Amino acid sequence: MNTLEFISSLIHSVIWPTVVFVLVLLFKEHLVQFIYSIRRVSFREVHVDVAERLTEMESSAGGQTRSLNAHEPAEGHVESMIRLTNQVDDIASFSPRAAILYTWSIVESSIYDIIKEQSSLNTGDITLYWKWLKKKKVLDRHTMKLLHNMHQLHEDVATKQGTHEVTPSDARRFCTLAQRIVRAIRERS
């Protein structure tokens, strides 16, 4: 082995760990967020625990949902909330994933209805509607973040990204959280 072969071998041995280290440093924030979003890993498949993500969303909604519970909803809203809860329970009994997808469609249609009442904004992008509602002071930063997290969970469940274990209890919790958000948006609009 001559000197050039030795140097080539040394560079070849050192370059990959160096590249990985530099990439970790560059993408440290994104990696940390990614790692925190993963709660359970198994061989060849990533398992994300929906229950833990819902718990995080509920705790982040903390003060807002408690203040909402202090006010009694209008009579028509109580009936629609009970009806939605019963529908979600029925759907969740045979497909919790479908219950989450159905609940999110209710959230989206409620937001669309509010936008139609107050604006001529006509786009299919839900995030543009959120921004408009935030601009009109209907959504605050915390509600916006909660909506984003719920939307992300909905997308993960819809695309079956990883293997999500969704229980009927998780679907009911998602429904309860969605009802609180819709109620808050309606009260503020």
Image (cartoon, grey):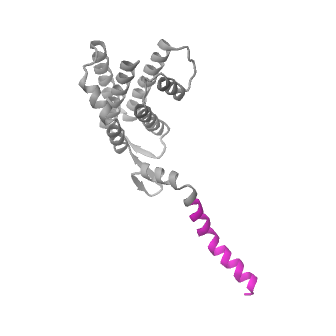
Region of the chain picked out in magenta, as a range: 1-23
- Residue 170 occupies which quadrant of the picture? top left
Q: Picture coordinates of residue 73 (x, y %)?
A: 28, 18
Q: List the single residue furthest toward the bottom.
A: 1
Asked whether residue 11 is drawn in magenta, I would say: yes
Residue 163 vs 158, above or below: the answer is below
- Write the residue at 48% across / 36% down: 155
Residue in front for this viewpoint, 166 or 33:
33
Q: Quadrant of the N terminus?
A: bottom right
- Write the residue at 44% across / 32% down: 144
Asked whether residue 51 is drawn in magenta, I would say: no
Q: Picture coordinates of residue 31 (x, y %)?
A: 50, 54
- Write the residue at 34% across / 29% down: 175
Residue in front for this viewpoint, 41 or 130:
130
Residue 150 vs 119, above or below: the answer is below
Magenta part, dominant SS: helix
- Write the residue at 28% across / 14% down: 74
Q: Say whether residue 173 is visible.
A: yes
Q: Quadrant of the C terminus?
A: top left
Q: Picture coordinates of residue 158 (x, y %)?
A: 47, 35
Q: Picture coordinates of residue 109 (x, y %)?
A: 45, 20
Q: Say whether residue 172 is visible.
A: no
